[in-house]
Amino acid sequence: MSERKGRFGEHGGQYMPETLMNAVIELEEAYEKWKNDPVFVKELEDLFRDYAGRPSLLTLAEKMTRDLGGAKIYLKREDLNHTGSHKINNVLGQALLAKKMGKTRLIAETGAGQHGVATATAAALLDMECVVFMGEEDTIRQALNVYRMRLLGAEVIPVKTGTKTLKDAVSEAMREWTSRISDTHYCLGSVMGPHPFPTIVRDFQAVISKEMKAQILEKEGRLPDAVIACVGGGSNAMGSFANFIEDTSVRLIGCEAAGRGIDTFETAATINTGRSGIFHGMKSYFCQDEYGQIAPVYSISAGLDYPGIGPEHAYLHDIGRAEYVPVTDEEAVQAFEYLSKTEGIIPAIESAHAVSKAMELAPKMAKDRIIIVTISGRGDKDCAAIARYRGEDLHE
């Protein structure tokens, strides 16, 4: 795959104000210097094992497999990582890199709050300052995670502009980075933004598919027929796909948040409804209105309601290597409840989008086929929101 200066086909690139170019160049040079350095690699591996709890399990969903009556379903359990999601993988990598660069302060954007919690956690561990930008709307939906971030010593700043959600938090974090490049690293949480972020985040998340591949070969002696993951910006999906891209027998399926349906304006399914544009420092696909402005998006999931998708996903779509399918709120909620009752695993509502696709796909496949679903996070944070969706008011 061509990565000409951070390009994935026509996507990616660096569309940045001059004020940020030096920071982006500094980050790229530091990453090139450290990514294969034996000391850095060992430090990160030690943190993954002794702090984050990796490798995460690959669990056979026996009851789900039996109930659906088709392909064998395995779950890649990123929900078991410290802090409860895949976000810790990338954050530990970036925080360690920031330390090597002499930075003392981490800033981050967050939607569902999991990336913010992971960043606050790494900052506490590595003795760094931490500021997290979060859309005001999301601070209400994810009050528990806001409390967790503050408990970990981070300052959480509610963003009151625009739609008061993830895209506005990203914009605010970039603005803040412009003003304090000298001591601050912007710990971007997904495979998006200007080069080198999409590459850095993919590389740190690729541990998911590296483990997945070794684990399925050990358990089944062969590769899976399909790998399914949810996609907002797309970091857990990119991490799940990365080591299978060359294995063309493996279907790669990304599940986008369709919200109330891709035929409505209340959706966040970028590949299914968006078109090419430039935003947040990258060229990719974005949900846009008739005038080419970034459109407001909606999903029950605070982590998937981003109006764009990472440039490498856009490229995998263009070349037909990965499929991107829409999953509605209702389908995701049903999958959330189904996995909880069937396997005793409460998935993040983000991950439930991927579970929903597996529920649809498995019965259509033969019993000797294998599907792996990435459970990108645990669902404790979503219980109050799902209860509200079902008409029950829970006081957190």
Image (cartoon, grey):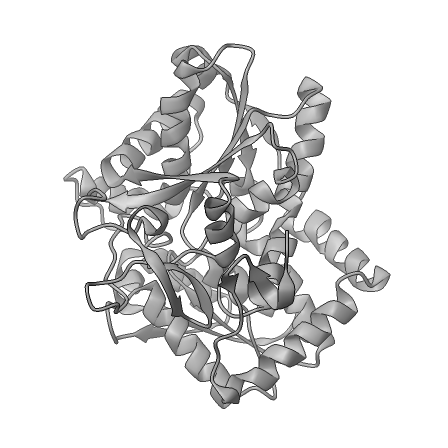
Give the x, y percent position of residue 170: 40, 70
Q: Left or right? Give the position of 387 relative to 63.
A: left
Residue 55 shows up from this direction: no
- Report the residue that reaches farthest toward the right: 38
Residue shown at the point (51%, 46%) measured from the top left: 316
Q: Nearer the viewer, residue 186 or 27?
A: 27
Q: Quadrant of residue 283?
A: bottom left
Q: Quadrant of residue 280?
A: bottom left
Residue shown at the point (18%, 37%) measured from the top left: 390
40 lies above or below 313: below
114 lies above or below 371: below
Give the x, y percent position of residue 104: 63, 80
Give the x, y percent position of residue 88: 57, 55
Residue shown at the point (36%, 44%) measured from the top left: 256
27 lies above or below 361: below
Give the x, y percent position of residue 263: 18, 44
119 lies above or below 396: below
Residue 26 shows up from this direction: yes
Q: Left or right? Give the position of 16 relative to 45.
A: left
